[in-house]
Amino acid sequence: AQSVTQLGSHVSVSEGALVLLRCNYSSSVPPYLFWYVQYPNQGLQLLLKYTTGATLVKGINGFEAEFKKSETSFHLTKPSAHMSDAAEYFCAVIRTGGGNKLTFGTGTQLKVEL
Amino acid sequence: EAGVAQSPRYKIIEKRQSVAFWCNPISGHATLYWYQQILGQGPKLLIQFQNNGVVDDSQLPKDRFSAERLKGVDSTLKIQPAKLEDSAVYLCASSAMGGGGELFFGEGSRLTVL
C-alpha cells in the first residue's frame, strides 16, 4: 500500500529564510504526489502536484517540490519564507490506477518568526 | 465557481447522541469524499463515492457511521451513537473525473463530543 512520511511535525523558520518540509513516499508503483496547505479553521488547498513529466514542480505562493525517485522523496521548498506561509502542510500520495484514493501524511506545522 | 459547501461548521454533542453533516460538492464533480481529521493527524478517508455509488468505505466504522449520496450530488454523513473519540474535523472533498487526483476541500465540520 502507498503511504507518505513527513519528517518533523513542527518546523520553525525566520521570515526570509529557506523553507524545507520533508516528505518521503512508499509506493509499489509510480505514484502521484501532492502537497496541500491548511490554514487555521479552513479546508485543504492544493499547493502543487507531481504526476508525470518534469520532476521539479512549481506551485502557488512560490513553493516548489522535486520528485526524486532514487530517494523516494518529494520535499517542499520555498526560497524565502513569509509570515503568511504559517500553516499546516500535508504531503499526500495517490497510487496510479488507484481510483483517486488520496492518502495523507501526518502533517508539518510551519511557524514563521520575525 | 462555488466551492465545496459544508454544514454545520461546528457541532457540540454529548456522547451517545447523534449528529449529521451535510456536503454539497462542486457542480459536476462526480467523486465525493469524506475525511476525518483528528487533531494532530492527517486526514483519513472514511468513504469515497463515485456518483451515487460507494467506491471505498473500508475505513468507515459502519457500526456507528453511515453516509449516503442520493442522486449523486450532495451527501450526508451521520454518526450514531457518537463516542468521545469521534471528536474531529470532518472534511468533505470533491473531484472531477480524470481530474488528475486534485481534490477540492470544504472548510470542514468540527465535532466536539463531550
Image: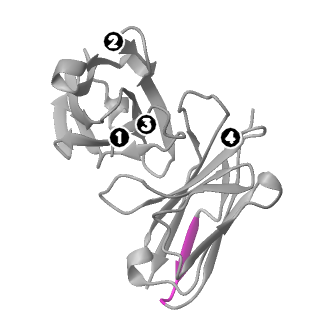
Q: Main secondary structure of the magenta part?
A: strand
Q: How crowded is mark 3: few (under 14 residues within 10 Å), some or many (20 or more)?
A: many
Residue A16, visible in the rendered structure: no
Chain hosting mark 4: B
* Residue at 24% across, 39% down: A111
Q: What element carries label 3?
A: strand
- Residue type, numbered disc 4: Gly
Secondary structure under the numbered disc 1 in the rendered image: strand
Disc 1 or disc 4, which is closer to the eye? Answer: 1
- Residue at 26%, 21% (x, y): give it: A77
Residue A83 position, x and y percent, is 32, 30
Tags 3 and 2 in contact by the CB under 8 Å rule?
no
Quadrant in the picture for residue B77:
bottom right
Q: How far apart in space, not on screen, are marks 4 and 3 (Cα)? A: 22 Å
Residue B3, labelled with which disc?
4
Q: Which chain carries label 1?
A: A
- Which is nearer the N-term, disc 3 or disc 2? 2
Q: Nearer the viewer, mark 1 or mark 3?
A: 3
Q: Quadrant of the C terminus of chain A?
A: top left
Residue, far top: A54
Which numbered marker is on residue A55?
2
Q: Position of residue A43 (x, y in %)?
A: 51, 46
Residue A24 placement, left or right of B99 = left
Image coordinates for residue B16, horizontal then vertical, percent: 51, 91
Q: Which of B15 and A16 is in front in this view?
A: B15
Marks 1 and 4 share the same chain: no
